[in-house]
Amino acid sequence: MSKCINNYFKILILCTLFINGPACSSVENYFYEVQFGNLIVGQAEISINTSNKKIELNSKSKTAGFLNVFYEYVGELNSSSIKEANIWIPNKFFTNGVFNNKARSSDLEWGVNNSVKYKNIPIINLKKFHPIDRESLINVIDPITAFLNVIERIRFENKCDTSFKIFDGRRRYDLKTKTLGNSFIENDRPKSFKGDVLICGLKILPLGGHRLKTNWNPIDDKFTDFKLFFGRTVYGRILPVRMNLERWFGTITVRLLEKRS
C-alpha cells in the first residue's frame, strides 16, 4: 500500500495543473489532503505561477499521521511549461524525494524538436525496475504539460478524452483520460469542495521504469478505478477538487481544501 500512496502523491501533483491561467501574471496557493479510510495519510501544498505563455509549479508533499510510523515520504516538484499556438509544450521538470532515508531526484529539460535530456540520481536499478527504451522517448512530454493540454479540451469542449506519451525521468508510460460525465458533489469533509464537477477517468499503461514485481496489473484497470473530479475554485480556476483511487487494499481519496487559517 505504501508504494501505491507514494505514486499517488506524484499523480496528485501532476493533476493539480488542470488550470486555466489568467492573462496577467499571478501566484496562487492550494492545499490538498490525502485520506485512506478515515485516516489522513498525506498532504500537499502547491504554488502555481501563471502568465500568458508560461506556467510554473512548485509543490511540497509529505506523508502524515499514522503512516509516518511505518513509511515516511517527503517530496518536492518544480516544473515549467510554455504555450505555443494554443498548445502547451514541456520546458523543465524536476522532482526529488526522500523515502526510507534514501534520496533520489530526476532533472529533465526539453530542447529543439521536443528532444529531452535527463539525469537521475541514483540511476535506475535494472534489478528492480524495467529498462526504458531510448527509442520510446521520441516526442514525449512531462505529466504536468500533458494535463495542461487536457484542460484546454475541458475548457472548450467540457470533455477530457485524450492520450499522451509521458516521461518523468524514471518512468515511461502512456496516459489516457476519458470523460465519465457531469455531476454535483457535496462537501463531505470540512472545507472541502461543493459544486458542479466534470468527472474524468484515468488509465496508465507502463512502458518502462516500473517495478519488475508488483501487485498492479494495468490490463485489469478500468477508467472508473481512478476518477478525477474537476470543478471551479473560488478563484475561478478549474482544478481537480477531488480524486478517488480504487485498489485491492481499499480507496484513497484526495481533497482540495480551503486555505488553512
Image (cartoon, rainbow, N blue to C red):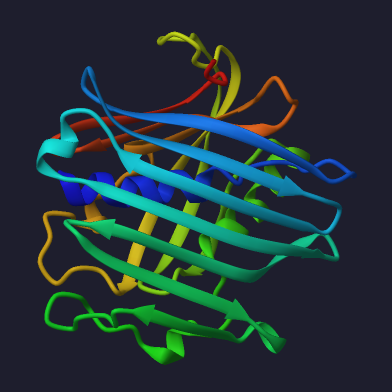
Residue 234 location, quadrant = top right
Residue 202 visible at all: no
Specify whether 143 is left or right of 67: right
Place of residue 29 in the rendered image (x, y in percent of width and height, measured from the top left): 62, 35
Quadrant assignment for the N terminus? top left
> How many numbered circles does the render carry?
0
Q: Is residue 109 above or below residue 97?
A: below
Q: Is residue 32 left or right of residue 89?
A: left
Is residue 124 visible to the viewer in this orientation of the structure?
Answer: yes
User: Considering the image in quadrants, where does the C terminus appear?
Assistant: top right
Image point 57% across, 32% down: which residue?
A: 30
Name above or below for residue 178 compared with residue 242.
below
Side of 232 where 204 appears, left or right: left
Could you tell me residue 121's position as x and y percent?
34, 78
Q: 228 or 24, which lies in front?
A: 24
Q: Give 63 or 172, whichever is nearer the viewer.
A: 63
Q: Residue at x 57, y 57 (%)?
A: 144
Indicate the position of residue 255 as horizontal and vertical percent values. Answer: 44, 26
Q: Residue furthest right?
A: 23
Q: Quadrant of residue 37?
A: top left
